[in-house]
Amino acid sequence: MRIEKRLQPSRTMVLMSPVLALVLTLLTGAALFKLLGHPAGLSLYNYFINPISDWYGVSELLVKVTPLLLCAIGLMLCFKGKVWNIGAEGQFIFAALISGYVSLQLLQAEGFWVLPVIILSGALAGMAWAGVAALLKTHFGASEILTTIMLNYIALNLLLWGVHGPLKDPDGYNFPESALFTDQTLLPLLSEDYRVTVAIYIALFMLAVVWFVLSKTLFGFQIRVLGESARAANFVGYNSKLLIWMLLLFSGAMAGVAAVSEVNGPVGQLIPTLNLGYGYAAIIVVFMGRMHPVGILIASFLLGLTYVGGEMVQIEQGMPKSIVGLFQGMLLFFLLACDLLIHYRLVLPNSAIPSFSSRRSKQVVS
Amino acid sequence: MDIAFIDNVLFATVRTATPLLLVALGAMMSERAGVLNLGQEGMVLVGAALAFIAAYVTGSMGWGVLAGAFAGMLVSVLFAFIALSLMANQVATGLALTIFGTGLSAFIGADYVGQSITGLSPIAIPLLSNIPLVGKALFAQDLLVYLSFGLFAGLWWIMRSTRLGLIIRAVGENPQAAHALGYPVIKIRYLAVLFGGAMAGLAGAYLSLSYTPMWSEGIAAGRGWIALALVVFASWRTQRVLLGAWLFGFASILHLLLQGYGYDISPNLLGMLPYLVTIIVLVIMMRRKQGIGDAPRSLGRPFSPSR
């Protein structure tokens, strides 16, 4: 068997590759469970089906989808423009710290403006953190991959400093946690029985906005040109530095809103472990979702499922919680491997169906 | 400030620099061959977990070190296959390796959190270790530190004055030309990535067998990423990697110094220092050179011999 370049990239494979990657991940997962002495079928059932077998489970999935989708919306634009923002995690954490501080100041405040102010503070804090990377890239030429990663670690240390120091609950028995948020500072729930908040609407609205911008406006086109080549973008008169700024700021804002959706939603206070790696998982969402709005919506459900499923096998079968990262890593690995089939095809030796180019290169084969 | 104090600072600097040096040397080699592997952090973690488990189970440090290096190399094969054979985007593949390695190491190490072993013990070289200032730092370390010195010297010699060094460089600068001359580009790149994996695994082994010595989730704490920045800082040159590693090592223990002097600063704020220094150093380098002019010209670009 050998590989052969396709004359044109296969659109079918663009869509099939994530499905194939999921199947391969499930097969490997089954083998892994079996290897560890767990029944493969039951384990996969517990991981991927059991968590969403009732409405409460589905609502918990939506709780994970909300921050994942918000982060992924911003990252999608960045990656389309080949701006490798690996810093959604740090932007999320820094925004959580700042909006958490704002929330703590507004615990007793009354009025319709309280939540908008908190959301805005989160978005601005996320933008500020992403703005540092934008400044370092456009003014100093420092690789955004490395700077955003470093900013992730710095943000995490800042959060730890906050909850161990100035933001620690004075009545909290010295636990490194802030005071609990009050009802005024918590996002409204969709229903009393579930933990899903209105933030899911914000995420879906932003997804629609981004879909419109990408498909119907010049800005969407400019991002694509930037992704092809920053030089080309400059030649046709687009300001590539400005584009980089806008992409990073937007994605920081989205990560910031994601932070508010989590901290002022299901978590309800600042804690040292509030980041579950959504910023990194959102990277996988964007790749699995083919950098398309509809795709990342579907992919955010899949990645959300890796979280709730991981919790389920942790409870049901005593698996370590790190199985989540393992599944997420496998998913991305398999996806990147399957993406080969977009530009290449597999040709079996003595294939009965000669393709145009294999006839040309017959001598090479034998 | 007395001599003994400076001795200890230099000793700690070299110790802290060792994992950075090991990862950065490995990353430098694969980048010199034109492969950008952002999976260093993941490889360090897998190496650290496996090294600890092997040492804990067998009770032998030797097996621990070997297991660490081997594990790092094994996961780097995944990267090499997808990025080199399947020609996937190297940035994305490297990220995948880091995410996968972080998960895998936490998964296999879960049962060993909180277990303890006696770490690698330092071996003082007679006479040399008594030299004032540098004696303790350079000649009273453990075997892995000496190994890192040896690897540094070997790589420096290979890159400076051997044919192999030239071939690796050619593959990274102009793979088409190297291919035309008959050098197996993909094979050389594979070997470079695998070497990088083994080095990252060694760094992991150093962390979990000597530096801490124990296993905890995310024990690498970004050292894989800092090492990648270090390679940029060093302009892909071996001697500068060593200098840079020592500089970063010193920056990483600054907070101990400050605390030693009685400054009352939150350990979490001081914990930001290595990452902050990394950013500052990147900025200074970029400002001086106006971009990454020294990078191998084909860094990060897939190569297909049939094209």
Image (tube, coloured by chain):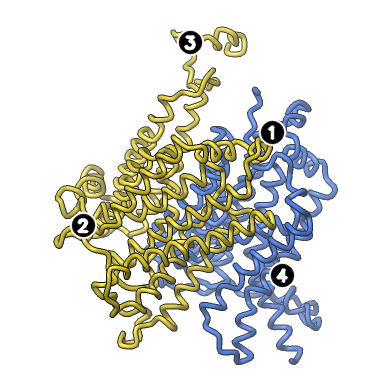
Q: Which mark is residue A350?
A: 3
Q: Label 4 is found on which chain of the structure?
A: B
Q: Report, in whole angstroms, how far the alpha carbon at label 1 lies from the one at label 4.
A: 34 Å
Figure chain in blue: B
- Give the amino acid at mark 1: Val
Hue of chain A? Answer: yellow
A27 sits to left or right of A49: right
A77 sits to left or right of B273: left
Task: Please name the residue that numbered disc 2 is placed on.
Answer: A316
Task: Please name the residue that numbered disc 1 is placed on.
Answer: B185
**Of the residues under marks 2 and 3, which one precedes in the sequence?**
2
Q: Report, in whole angstroms, how far the alpha carbon at label 1 lies from the one at label 2.
A: 49 Å
Residue A13 drawn at (x, y percent): 42, 27
Q: Which tag is nearer the camera, tag 3 or tag 4?
A: 4
**Of the residues under marks 1 and 4, which one precedes in the sequence?**
1
The mark total stands at: 4
Tag 2 secondary structure:
helix
